[in-house]
Image (cartoon, rainbow, N blue to C red):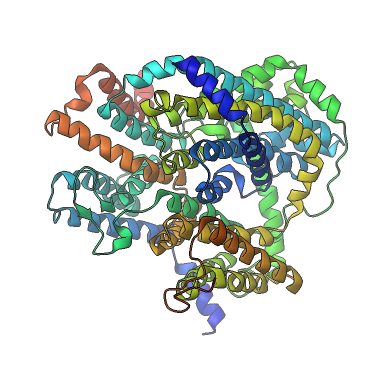
C-alpha cells in the first residue's frame, strides 16, 4: 500500500502546476521569514483563506513550502541587520551578523541556504523512512488515546512556553473553551449561540489563527519605529565559498538537523528552541569555542540546519495525532482541516498519497531553497529595508478581507478583531498564544474524542487508564504537569 | 485636565493583565453557569471541564499576590524546560538591550506615546482604526472601506501622500481580487449598498 501511495504521490508532485505552488510557497515563505515581525505563522495564516480555491493537495503543498521557505528567510535579516526574522533564526545572529560586518554577508547567506536545505532534506527523508513505523503506531490509537494526546500536547506547551505554567494552562483551556460555541458534536445541543445563526457553526479556527497571529502581531509592530534596516546593506562575499564551506562540515549539519528534528517533534518546542540547542552543541564540540560569536561559520550552519530540521520533526505529531508542534504547524493543521483532511489514521490509510505528496514537495522545496537562496538572495535582502508602516496596513487588509472570505460571516470578522486584541495583551503579558491557538484547533477533535470515549465506556472515565497505551499517556500528562514542581522538592530532599 | 493628561492618566492606570484576567474570569464563569441550562448533559461536559480550568487558573493568577508563598511560586513561576543557556541569554539580552535603548532614544526624541508624535499610543490608534475599518466595512462593504482604512492609517503615521495613495490602490486591488477570485460579496454592505455594485 505504501509503495503504491508513494508512486501516486510522485506523479502528483511532478504534475503541473504543483511544482509552481512549491516555488510560490517557498518564495512567499522567504519573504515572510525575512520580514521581522511577520514570520511563518503569520504569513501562513493570512494565505490560508486564499488556498480555498486550490485543491487540498496543492493547498497543503503551498503551506508546507511557505513553512520551509520562512525558516530560511528568517536568517536573511538575522545575518544582514542582526534582527532574526523568526525565532528560529535567533542564534543565527550570533555569528551571521559578525560575518556580515566582516564583509562576508553573501558567504553567510549562502551557508544559511545550504545548511537549511540539507538539514531540512535530512529530516524529511528520515520522516519518509520512518513513516511505515508511524503508520503502525498511529493505527494503535483510538478515541481515548486521541483525546489524551490532545491534552498531552497542550500540557507540553505549557511547560515549554515562556511564562508561568498556570498562564499556559489558562491560555490553552481558554482556546478549548471558545470552541464549545455552536452545535455540540454528536448532539443537537446549541451552546452559547443565543439565537444568532452566525454562531451555529461556532468560531472559525482560521479566523482565530488570523486574529492571534496577524492582528496581535501588527498591533505590536505598529508601536515600533519605522524600517527594519536604516541604511544600505553591504552585500559582499562569495556564494561559492559559502556553499563549499557548509558542505565541508557534514557532521555539524547532520547533528544539528537531527537536533532540530527531535526538538521539533516535541509539541511547543520548535525552531525557537532547537536553534539554540544546536548552536550550543556545535560550540561545545568545537576545538575553538571562543571564536563563536565572532563570525564562526559553524554558528550559522548549526543554527540554520537545525531550524529547517524541525520541520520534519514537527510534522510527526501534526499529521499523526493532530498535535501541532509550533504556531506554523497549527496553521498547517488548520489548512488540513479546512480542506477536509483529518490528521491521524486517515492520513496514513486512504490519504497516504497526500501525506507522501507534501513530504516529497518538501524534499523538492529544499533543493529550491538552495537555488532561490543563492540566486535571488541579493534581491530578498532589500526586504529588510521596507518600512513597517507599509507592511502593517497591507497585512491588516489581508486579515480582514481573509476573515470575511472564510464564510461571508461577520462573526468571523469580529473573531479576527477580538482575538487580535486579546492576543496582543497575551503576547505582552507572557501568556502563550501558541497554547491558545492549539486549544482552538484541537478543541473540536478533543471534544469529539472525549464524547466518543465516554459513549464507549458508558460514561466512565476509567477508559482513560484501563488500556496500557492510554495509561501511559495519562501518566505522561500527570508527570509533565506535576513534575516541574515536584522535581525541585525531591532534589532538595535528596541533597 | 487636558485630554493628553487624561489619556496619560488612563493609560497609566489601565492594567492590561488585570483586564485580561477579568475577561477570562467573567467569560469562563458565565460559560460554566450556562452549562447548567443545557438540555443534553453530555454537551455540558467539555465546556464545564475547560471552563473550570480557565476560571480557577485565572482566579489564582488574579489573586496571586495574596496567595501563600509556596502556592504563589507554583502559580507564577515558569516550568523552565528548554530555557536557553545562561551564556545565550546574556548574548540575547545584549542584543535586546541594545535595540531597546535605541528604541527608547527614538521615543524620547519624538514623543512618549507615539513614534510619529501623535497624542495616543500607536497600538491604540491601530486597534481603533481597524475597529473603524470593520464598522465601515459592515455598513458599506469591505471593498469600499479598504482604501479609507489605508488612507487613515497612512495619514496618522505621516506617510507621504503618494505612498498612501499607492497603498490604498493596492489595498483596494487585494479586496477586489478576493471578491473576483473567491466570489465573496465584499462590495455589499449590511446597511448601505446592500445589493452590491459589481
> How far across and down, in percent of the image, does residue B69 sit?
33, 43
Residue at 66 percent of width and 74 percent of height: B155
> How far across and down, in percent of the image, does residue B187 sit?
52, 70
Rendered view: A255 above or below A316: above
Visible residue check, residue A180: yes
* Front position in the image: B130 or B179: B179
* Front position in the image: A354 or A185: A354
Q: Quadrant of the C terminus of chain A?
A: top left
Instruction: Tell me: A245 left or right of A160.
Output: right
Q: Which quadrant holds residue A112? A: top right
Residue at 39 percent of width and 52 percent of height: A204
Visible residue check, residue A89: no
Instruction: Tell me: A441 left or right of A260.
Output: left
Rendered view: A384 above or below A142: below
Q: Which quadrant holds residue A198? A: bottom left
> How far across and down, in percent of the image, does residue A51 sit?
53, 46
* Front position in the image: B183 or A359: B183
Residue at 59 percent of width and 57 percent of height: A395
Rendered view: B2 above or below A169: below
Amino acid at each position: 500500500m505504501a509503495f503504491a501511495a508513494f508512486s501516486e504521490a510522485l506523479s502528483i508532485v511532478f504534475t503541473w502546476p504543483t511544482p509552481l505552488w512549491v516555488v510560490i510557497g517557498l518564495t512567499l515563505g522567504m519573504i515572510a521569514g525575512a520580514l521581522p515581525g511577520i514570520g511563518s505563522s503569520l504569513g501562513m495564516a493570512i494565505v490560508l483563506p486564499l488556498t480555498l480555491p486550490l485543491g487540498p493537495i496543492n493547498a497543503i503543498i503551498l503551506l508546507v513550502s511557505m513553512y520551509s521557505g520562512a525558516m530560511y528567510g528568517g536568517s536573511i535579516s538575522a545575518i544582514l541587520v542582526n534582527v532574526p526574522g523568526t525565532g528560529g533564526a535567533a542564534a543565527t545572529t550570533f555569528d551571521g551578523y559578525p560575518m556580515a560586518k566582516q564583509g562576508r554577508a553573501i558567504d553567510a547567506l549562502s551557508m544559511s541556504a545550504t545548511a537549511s536545505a540539507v538539514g531540512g532534506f535530512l529530516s524529511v527523508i528520515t520522516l519518509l523512512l520512518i513513516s511505515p513505523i508511524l503508520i503502525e503506531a498511529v493505527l494503535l490509537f483510538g478515541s481515548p488515546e486521541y483525546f489524551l494526546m490532545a491534552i498531552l500536547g497542550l500540557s507540553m506547551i505549557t511547560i515549554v512556553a515562556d511564562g508561568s505554567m498556570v498562564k499556559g494552562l489558562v491560555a490553552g483551556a481558554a482556546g478549548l473553551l471558545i470552541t464549545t460555541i455552536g452545535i455540540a458534536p454528536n448532539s443537537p445541543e446549541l451552546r452559547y449561540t443565543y439565537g444568532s445563526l452566525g454562531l451555529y457553526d461556532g468560531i472559525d479556527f482560521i479566523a482565530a489563527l488570523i486574529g492571534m497571529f496577524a492582528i496581535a502581531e501588527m498591533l505590536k509592530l505598529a508601536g515600533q519605529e519605522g524600517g527594519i534596516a536604516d541604511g544600505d546593506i553591504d552585500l559582499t562575499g562569495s556564494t561559492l565559498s559559502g556553499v563549499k564551506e557548509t558542505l565541508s562540515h557534514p557532521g555539524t549539519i547532520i547533528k544539528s538537523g537531527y537536533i532540530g528534528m527531535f526538538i521539533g517533534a516535541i509539541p511547543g518546542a520548535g525552531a525557537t528552541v532547537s536553534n539554540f540547542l544546536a548552536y550550543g552543541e556545535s560550540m561545545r564540540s568545537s576545538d575553538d569555542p571562543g571564536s563563536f560569536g565572532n563570525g564562526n561559520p559553524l554558528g550559522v550552519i548549526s543554527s540554520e540546519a537545525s531550524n529547517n530540521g524541525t520541520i520534519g520533526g514537527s510534522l510527526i505529531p501534526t499529521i499523526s495525532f493532530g498535535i501541532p508542534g509550533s504556531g506554523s504547524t497549527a496553521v498547517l493543521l488548520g489548512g488540513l482541516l479546512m480542506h477536509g483532511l483529518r490528521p491521524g489514521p486517515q492520513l496514513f490509510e486512504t490519504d497516504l498519497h497526500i501525506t507522501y505528496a507534501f513530504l516529497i514537495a518538501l524534499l523538492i522545496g529544499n533543493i529550491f531553497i538552495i537555488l532561490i537562496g543563492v540566486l535571488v538572495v541579493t534581491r530578498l535582502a532589500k526586504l529588510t529595508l521596507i518600512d513597517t508602516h507599509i507592511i502593517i496596513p497591507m497585512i491588516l487588509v489581508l486579515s480582514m478581507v481573509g476573515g470575511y472570505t472564510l464564510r461571508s460571516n461577520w462573526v468571523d470578522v469580529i473573531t479576527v478583531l477580538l482575538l487580535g486584541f486579546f492576543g496582543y495583551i497575551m503576547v505582552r503579558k507572557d501568556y502563550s498564544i501558541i497554547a491558545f491557538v492549539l486549544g482552538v484547533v484541537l478543541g473540536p477533535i478533543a471534544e469529539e474524542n472525549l464524547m466518543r470515549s465516554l459513549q464507549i465506556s458508558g460514561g466512565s472515565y476509567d477508559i482513560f487508564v484501563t488500556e496500557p497505551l492510554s495509561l501511559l499517556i495519562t501518566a505522561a500528562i500527570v508527570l509533565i504537569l506535576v513534575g516541574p514542581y515536584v522535581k525541585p522538592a525531591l532534589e532538595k530532599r535528596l541533597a | 485636565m487636558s485630554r493628553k493628561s487624561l489619556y496619560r492618566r488612563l493609560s497609566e492606570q489601565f492594567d492590561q493583565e488585570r483586564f485580561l484576567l477579568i475577561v477570562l474570569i467573567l467569560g469562563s464563569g458565565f460559560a460554566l453557569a450556562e452549562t447548567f441550562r443545557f438540555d443534553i448533559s453530555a454537551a455540558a461536559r467539555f465546556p464545564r471541564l475547560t471552563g473550570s480550568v480557565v476560571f480557577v487558573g485565572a482566579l489564582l493568577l488574579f489573586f496571586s499576590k495574596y496567595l501563600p508563598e509556596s502556592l504563589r511560586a507554583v502559580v507564577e513561576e515558569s516550568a523552565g524546560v528548554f530555557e536557553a543557556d545562561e551564556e545565550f541569554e546574556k548574548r540575547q539580552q545584549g542584543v535586546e538591550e541594545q535595540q531597546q535603548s535605541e528604541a527608547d532614544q527614538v521615543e524620547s526624541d519624538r514623543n512618549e506615546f507615539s513614534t510619529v508624535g501623535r497624542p495616543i499610543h500607536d497600538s491604540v490608534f491601530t486597534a481603533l482604526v481597524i475597529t473603524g475599518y470593520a464598522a465601515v466595512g459592515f455598513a458599506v462593504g469591505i471593498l469600499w472601506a479598504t482604501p479609507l482604512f489605508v488612507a487613515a492609517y497612512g495619514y496618522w503615521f505621516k506617510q507621504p501622500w503618494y505612498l498612501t495613495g499607492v497603498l490604498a490602490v493596492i489595498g483596494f486591488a487585494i479586496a477586489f481580487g478576493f471578491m473576483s477570485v473567491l466570489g465573496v460579496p465584499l462590495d455589499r454592505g449590511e446597511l448601505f449598498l446592500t445589493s452590491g455594485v459589481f
